[in-house]
Amino acid sequence: MTLALVGKAALRILGFTIPVPVTLILAALAWVQFDKSSAIRSAVNERVKEMVAGAEIEALEAQIAAQRQIAARSAEAAREAQRRLTVEATARTNLSMRLMAIQTENEILNDDLADLLSRPVDRDCAVDADVLGRLQSR
């Protein structure tokens, strides 16, 4: 009972000093309470949940598509790197074989040069018949 008297006194003071805001606040609270239990609000809440879930699903699908695209590009880059590695290995092998052939030819030419330098020179510095024949045939 004392609580009812205190509430009544408080309402009388608040209602007298600021009647509109208290009434509006009480009306808004009543509307919120009524609105929470209404079927329309429940339907709106369900639709909002569906829309949010749909948006989340679309975002996840877009993320999966982007990850698939990244994976495809990564696989393509790996294939390209492997192809380049194969081409490089082939080029190195070919270059090594050419280098060995050139070194062999160089050794042969050095041996020929050493052979030519080891021959004694005629007193009149004439070219011998063998060298002269080689010079004329070229």
Image: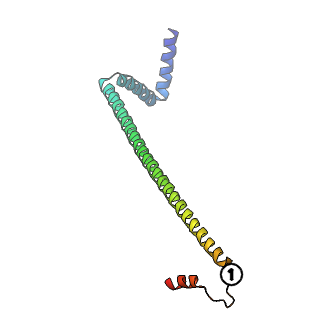
Judging depth in this view, the residue of 83 and 33 nearest the camera is 83
* Colour mapping: rainbow
Residue 138 appears anywhere in the view: no
**Residue 48 falls in image quadrant:** top left
Mark 1, other Cα within 10 Å: few <14 / some 14–19 / many ≥20 = few
Looking at the image, is 86 positioned above or below residue 13?
below
Residue 51 appears anywhere in the view: yes
- The answer to whether 100 appears left or right of 52 in the picture is right
Judging depth in this view, the residue of 86 and 30 nearest the camera is 86
- The answer to whether 98 appears left or right of 59 in the picture is right
Q: Which residue is mark 1?
A: 120
Q: Position of residue 50 (x, y in %)?
A: 33, 31
Q: Amino acid at mark 1?
A: Pro
Looking at the image, is 99 positioned above or below residue 54?
below
Looking at the image, is 43 positioned above or below residue 107?
above
**Residue 64 falls in image quadrant:** top left
Q: Position of residue 62 (x, y in %)?
A: 38, 41
Q: Position of residue 40 (x, y in %)?
A: 30, 27
* Residue drawn at point x = 50 percent, y = 56 percent: 88
Judging depth in this view, the residue of 36 and 77 nearest the camera is 77
Q: Position of residue 38 (x, y in %)?
A: 32, 23
- The answer to whether 132 appears left or right of 53 in the picture is right
> SS at mark 1?
loop
* Residue drawn at point x = 47 percent, y = 26 percent: 16
Looking at the image, is 26 positioned above or below residue 90?
above
Report the residue that reaches farthest toward the top. Answer: 1
